[in-house]
Image: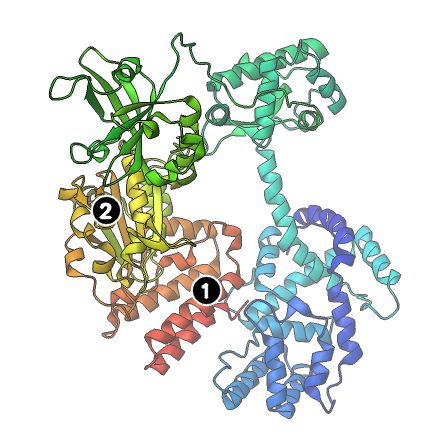
Amino acid sequence: MIDHAKLEPVLRGYQAYFSQHWLHGEDFKWEAAQQFHDHWNIDAADFGGMFKEATAKVFSLLDTGYAYPRAMILDFAAADCEATRTMFRSLFDESIGLSQRIAAFQAAAESLRIKYNDGSWNNHYQNTSAISVYLWLQFPDKYYAYRYAVSRDIAKELNFDAPPKRDGSIDSLLNSYRLYDELRTALSQNTAVTQMIRSAIDAAPAGKYWPDTHWNIAAIDLGFYLSRYYLQEQTVAQKESEWFPSKADYDPGITTEQWISLLNDPSVFTQNALRIMKCMLDYGGQATCKQLAIKYGEAAGFYNMGSSSLARRVVEKTNCPLMPRDSENSRWWPVLYTGKSADSKEDGSYIWRLRDELIQALKKTDLSHIPLYSVSSEKDSTSPRHYWWLTASPKIWQFSDLKVGEEQSYTLYNESGHKRRIFQNILDAKAGDPVICYEANPVKKVVALAKITQENNGKELYFEKIENLISPIEYSTLKDCPELEKMEFFVQQNGSLFKLSEGEYNFILDLIREENPAPVRSIASNAYTKSDFLNSVFLSEPRYDVLVSLLRRKKNVILQGAPGVGKTYAAKRLAYSMMGQADSSRVEFVQFHQNYSYEDFMLGYRPDGSGFKLTEGVFYRFCQKASNDPDREYFFLIDEINRGNLSKIFGELMMLIESDHRGEKITLAYNGMPFYVPENLYIIGMMNTADRSLAMIDYALRRRFSFFEMEPAFTSEGFQNYQSALDNETFNALVEQVKALNREITADASLGSGFRIGHSYFCLADPAACTADWMRSVVEFDLLPTLAEYWFDAPDKLHRWEENLRGVFNDD
């Protein structure tokens, strides 16, 4: 028996759904039944052509996703028209028991598949679901179109005493028929629903729809609505109910027009109040105070207390009702917002959402004059700011000898005791002045930026290197700019510290920034912890600790393992967890291949339209980026690391990447400049152990990396929690088959554990996407092609696993 009390709201919802969807595609069930009866002729000379026309309106009830029962019937008819005709003649013979007919139909389909298989017929697809559609089309007032997933949802929601099983059995189909019979009976007794459906059918041209006098098709449609729409609506309603207070609990009663009037009243909405509202609107209409503080500035209390104060003024102005709350502060914010607790991944503990009327009023109010971001005022300086060009002679010293953040002294007198040239410049330099750093011949490039940290004390002044230029600026580039022709350095190059005008400095800085975007520190709000890693990468905590320890000690780690164990996924999140922040700006990703070269990786000449230009590679640029930020960690990820010619790609880096040689400089042959791999940079490589086409990794490189095995994590606590949350019987059955498959792969002498199937094939960000079609796609287009490559010389073993994996879906 079904729970009729739980069916009542479903029927009410169905009435609204029906009126919206009937003429937008959902009328096809009634049309399909009529189409079938208009064209069905069991004795037609061209049975296949007749079947195709008779089922032309069935659409998703037959061929969907990765099951093709209708297409297979057409293939069977083309191969053996009479045998196919006989199958249907027997199926529709009501003098024979239903269970016997279904079993005979499936047996006949398998016989045809085996007899006429040209190598592409791996499945006849005539499961109980497809057969139920044939029966329903022939007898639309007696049978129903059955889907296991739909019947399961109906049974669960309405507390049916015999829910279907996912075993694809005839018994499950018969139980579902009993379920639909009860659903049809209840629907037929609801006058509002039946009159609505009857009116829709009668309004159509005569003969378009099956009359559905017994309401079987209506029951099918109601079941689809419950499974596909009603349950989703309930989920949305549940999430909406989390917001407090509801309209029924409390409503200040302020209309959109009244809010607009209040927004234009400066005694209510002060500048700060308007700014809080603008920030909330810009953030999407809902946010925690901490989220607003992180993005727009100010402390969280600015938004918290500012909102409460604003609400007080609104109440004083309008005399609107006030909701009683436990604390003084929490009495006020419901005037402006509804709220709910933030989840663990959001900054802050409580989310506010602008009331609908207020958000509409804000959209209609001009807030262009209200600043969005906090502006911090700087103290006025009584002394003018200067700008400097500092030249280093590589034969004596180099800017590359300094690390970012390192302070260096600069003497007022040379080794002979004489004043340095343009002595007045040294006297004029003040703390805070910006400096352009240039290295003379043979480098002849602007290579860094610095600032004066201490003005002269009679003997020396001090400057601090603040940024390495990832792409240094050529002397020739600057010399050819007419805007710089009067620059002191170009007019008179004798000396070291040259004055720049503000315009000259800004012009050079613009050229620098075209090739070297200003380093931007990401907002520290997107924290990423060890717990976040363990929750998303199904690795045990002890194994995680070992991996982090290896990487911190060795600086270089290769994650190796079978396909689909999540090596790339884990690598990025390992970086985030070690940084403590999901900051993609500090993670670089490349993939090696057979044609990848040192020039791509480090440095080389490339055509630039008029010749060849020396161009920095991705690793060179990333090392410079990391060296500009020595207090934070950077991670360089290399996918398919064993696909490249590693000795050719790494070149002299073979030594520099070693943990013991980090920070040591060598002079690069291409540009003659010193280079080092900074200590705050880690390298994570990924290697697929199941790729037989690849050579062994270079032994010289192997010595410089630690190797960490990533394994399928089906039995890990994290994956089991993920699997349990999906609560999907088909998924559970598929995972069990894959676990058994992995055991056989491990035992296979020609394969071994490195060829197992990984868990990442089965990981989804959205649990709602875990559908039978998605799982079929994984089996058909990921797993089976892999097994075909593994067992190309063992067709029996391959066929057995094809049946095992496809068999999971036989009941859908």
Q: Residues within 10 Å of mark 1 (few under 14, many from 20)?
A: some
Residue 439: give x, y in percent of width and height: 26, 35
Label disc, if present, on residue 778 of the rendered structure = 1
Picture residue at 22% right of the left edge, 74% below the top:
749
Q: Which of the 4 image quadrants contains residue 450?
A: top left
User: Which quadrant: the C terminus?
Assistant: bottom right
Mark 2 lies on residue: 547
Picture residue at 27% right of the left edge, 53% below the top:
685
> On the rendered structure, is 304 left or right of 225?
left
The amino acid marked with disc number 2 is Leu
Q: Residue furthest top?
A: 382
| Mark 2 vs 1: CB contact within 8 A | no
Q: How crowded is mark 2: few (under 14 residues within 10 Å), some or many (20 or more)?
A: some
In this rendering, is residue 66 above or below 545? Answer: below
In this rendering, is residue 417 above or below 712? Answer: above
Secondary structure under the numbered disc 2 in the rendered image: helix
Q: Which of the 4 image quadrants contains residue 137?
A: bottom right
Colour scheme of the rendered structure: rainbow
The amino acid marked with disc number 1 is Val
Label disc, if present, on residue 294 of the rendered structure = none
Q: How far is disc 2 from disc 1 in space, using C-alphas?
A: 30 Å
The answer to which of marks 2 and 1 sits earlier in the sequence is 2
Q: Total number of numbered labels? A: 2
Q: Which one is in front, 135 or 431?
A: 431
Residue 187: give x, y in percent of width and height: 75, 56
Depth check, mark 2 against mark 1: the one in front is 2
Picture residue at 23% right of the left edge, 39% below the top:
678
